[in-house]
Amino acid sequence: MRKIKKYQQPNIFRSFYYALRGLGFVFYTQKNMRIHLFMACVALGLGIFFQISKLEWISLIFSVLFVLFAETLNTALEINVDLTTKKIKFRAMLSKDLAAGAVLISAINAIIIGCFIFGPRLF
């Protein structure tokens, strides 16, 4: 009879390594993530240039991170759907489309917040 090994929780450094490896994967494989990161750098640069308030920084950083989070989750879901389905199925397609829609909602939210923060300063 084979002995079952007890599951060991990875140490904190290995956990961070796995998380950073996942973020690296999303960055190198997803064009949209690179676009989101570029736009985040533009928004943060504008924040520095216009010396926005602390509350505006909180709003800006939260909206930027929310978009990056949504894109990362979307990628994970798409990979999972691809792993579990061999054929094109309506529900698999719908699942991927819904995740992409969530990214779109978060990006629209970021654009609206950016317009509130930078609109009066730019125009």
Image (cartoon, grey):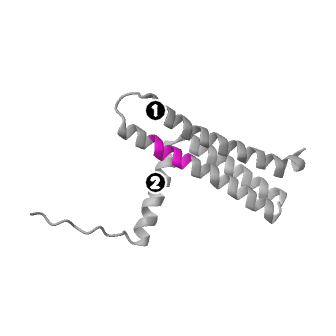
Label 2 to label 1, Cα distance in Å?
A: 26 Å
Q: What is the x, y in percent for residue 34?
A: 58, 45
Residue 44's quadrant in the figure?
bottom right
Q: Does the magenta stretch include residue 74?
A: yes
- Considering every residue shown, the one lying at the far left of the view is 1
Q: Name the residue under label 2.
A: 22
**Figure quadrant of the N terminus:** bottom left
**Figure quadrant of the C terminus:** top right
Tell me which secondary structure the magenta stretch mostly adopts: helix
| Amino acid at dot 1 | Arg
Q: What is the x, y in percent for residue 108?
A: 71, 42
| Mark in the foreground, 2 or 1 | 1
Residue 21's quadrant in the figure?
bottom left
Q: Residue at x 36, y 28 (%)?
A: 87
Query: Is residue 23 placed above or below 2 in the rendered structure?
Result: above
Mark 2 vs 1, N-terminal side: 2
Q: What is the x, y in percent for residue 104?
A: 64, 40
Q: What is the x, y in percent for residue 62?
A: 69, 57
Q: Is mark 2 on a helix, strand or loop?
A: helix
Q: Does the magenta stretch include residue 121?
A: no
For this view, does 82 lie left or right of residue 101?
left
Q: Which residue is drawn at 79% across and 59% down?
A: 56
For this view, does 97 lie left or right of residue 21?
right
Q: Are marks 2 and 1 in contact (CB under 8 Å)?
A: no
- Identify the mark at residue 91; answer none if there is no mark: 1
Q: Nearer the viewer, residue 89 or 22?
A: 89
| Amino acid at dot 2 | Gly
Crowding around mark 1 (Cα neighbors within 10 Å: few <14, some 14 to 19, many 20+) is few
Q: Residue at x 47, y 47 (%)?
A: 76
Give the residues in magenta: 71-78
Residue 33's quadrant in the figure?
top right
